[in-house]
Amino acid sequence: MAKDNRITLYDLQLRTGATISPFVWATKYAIAHKGFEIDIVPGGFTGIVERTGGRSERLPVIVDDGKWVLDSWLIAEYLDETHPDRPILIGSRQVEVATKFIETWLWTTVLREWMPNIVQDYRDMSLDVDRDYVTRTRTPPGKTLEEIQAGREDRLPLIPPKLELLRTSLRETPWLGGEAPNYTDYRALAVFLFMAAVATTPVLTEDDPLRDWIDRGFDLHGGLGRHPGLHPLFGLKLREGDPEPFSKAPAAGGLAKRNTGPASTHEETERLQARMREATPA
Amino acid sequence: MAKDNRITLYDLQLRTGATISPFVWATKYAIAHKGFEIDIVPGGFTGIVERTGGRSERLPVIVDDGKWVLDSWLIAEYLDETHPDRPILIGSRQVEVATKFIETWLWTTVLREWMPNIVQDYRDMSLDVDRDYVTRTRTPPGKTLEEIQAGREDRLPLIPPKLELLRTSLRETPWLGGEAPNYTDYRALAVFLFMAAVATTPVLTEDDPLRDWIDRGFDLHGGLGRHPGLHPLFGLKLREGDPEPFSKAPAAGGLAKRNTGPASTHEETERLQARMREATPA
């Protein structure tokens, strides 16, 4: 397995050469986490079936010393099974469950909101060969991608507050995986790598507390997330009346000291939790 | 430690004798998970400091063969540390991170929405000695608890759809902890145990897919969650125009077969994910 310590990855790319697919991003990180070199097979949406010799309609796909493995989750499981002596990506069913929970939360809460604000970028950033396909499949009836994306400066400032739950988690741990990153981090980072690959305007503020984790994540494995085709994620400009993009300082009172539980940034919930455990005042 | 295999737990109870505090519920499950018998010290919010000999203003508190341990998270960690040979509750930093993520999501997304609909029940269910305290601390200026709770039949049907992310997770695994329950399940179940202890009206529909996990959870450890003081959680009546309480069947198409990832019930996200990995149609 992994002849010469190399694994072949079929990439899904933009015209910049950067990976677009969050699933391919997660797989790149998974391969690097296991200590393998990656041989990239370049390409876009068009011609996946031909490139993979009829084996797959979707990416990522890897080839490990002649063995083809399809689907990002199956690839991560395959890497753990065939190389249990190397750093573990998932390791237990409970990590798989938690990873899918956090990823689904990110997709439904944040990425879905971001999408209408980057669809024109998405098309413009596509490979020439993918342009018609992307235009056709991303355009709803009766509207152009330009019309959908227009006015995003009004909508983008409303999205950062929705990331508060992730900020709360990362205030107590360097990585979602604990002391070191694992596949949970890679699936979550992949959303931000996707955004950096596609969005031509920053979607998070300069001072977002998530920046520390995102920057460390992009730096991992020799700067795997530092492809020159990526755009700056940080630098979103707020205007008068926009909501606070994130909760300022964690509460520093007695509860924060005693309660190592969650929700330290959710003041209302914190009050709720405090009232459920506190005695009557003396 | 744990003389005669028994641990003393200071409870926080309602007039029914049922535990109200979700933190005490999680701690009860944690002690039982470790295979210990529980000696309950009964009581409500009033007099916690006195009951615990001045050691704590909050509950839960346990005493293990003379050793006092305060705070539900610290208790769970203490039980794992002192009894690593018994079933593990948390076991790793990544499980702790994931548990807090899922719990905070539950509190901020669902429990916070339920609270205004049960505040009158909360007071009415309180011990006589706690009634004034509960009334005073739960009542906002200018409104009675009756006024806040009134009209809940209009609001309660809007809340079950918000639990979809938890349903999605539990469609792929018997427990959040994987093949067996762990502290993640107990922290999440504690929210439903709290609701069953307090709410005098069902808050979930009879056919909610969460029912399987909740029922199995309440049955654990000799029916620890089957206290006779609990009310039925299932049986919420929907009226014309109320939203679907949960997503009906998981998608059964090619994506569901191939994509072992999350979001199978989030149709919009599913389409988004499908488009990000699919080749151009032939």
Image (tube, coloured by chain):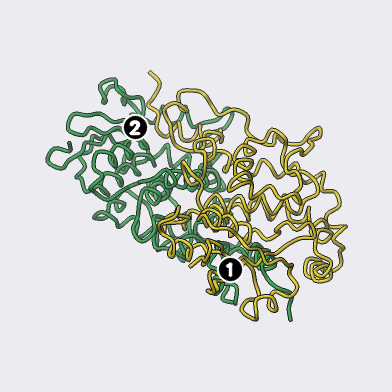
Chain colours: A green, B yellow
* Residue at the extreme front of the image, as rendered: B4
Residue B146 appears in which quarter of the rendering? bottom right
Q: Which mark is residue A59?
A: 2
Q: Position of residue B194 (x, y in %)?
A: 69, 54
B264 left or right of B215 in image: left
Q: Amino acid at mark 2?
A: Leu
Q: Position of residue A153 (x, y in %)?
A: 55, 53
Q: Position of residue A174 (x, y in %)?
A: 39, 63
Q: Amino acid at mark 1?
A: Ile
**Residue B258 in sight here:** yes
Within-10-Å neighbours for mark 2: few <14, some 14–19, many 20+: many
Label 1: state its secondary structure.
strand
Q: Position of residue B110 (x, y in %)?
A: 66, 50
Which quadrant, please, contains the C terminus of chain A? Answer: bottom right
Q: Residue at x 48, y 61 (%)?
A: A205
Q: Observer-nearest residue: A195 or A189? A: A189
Relative to A6, say whether A253 is above or below. Answer: below
Q: Residue at x 67, y 61 (%)?
A: B21
Where is mark 1, residue-wise?
B62
A8 left or right of B258 in image: left
A182 left or right of B48 in image: left
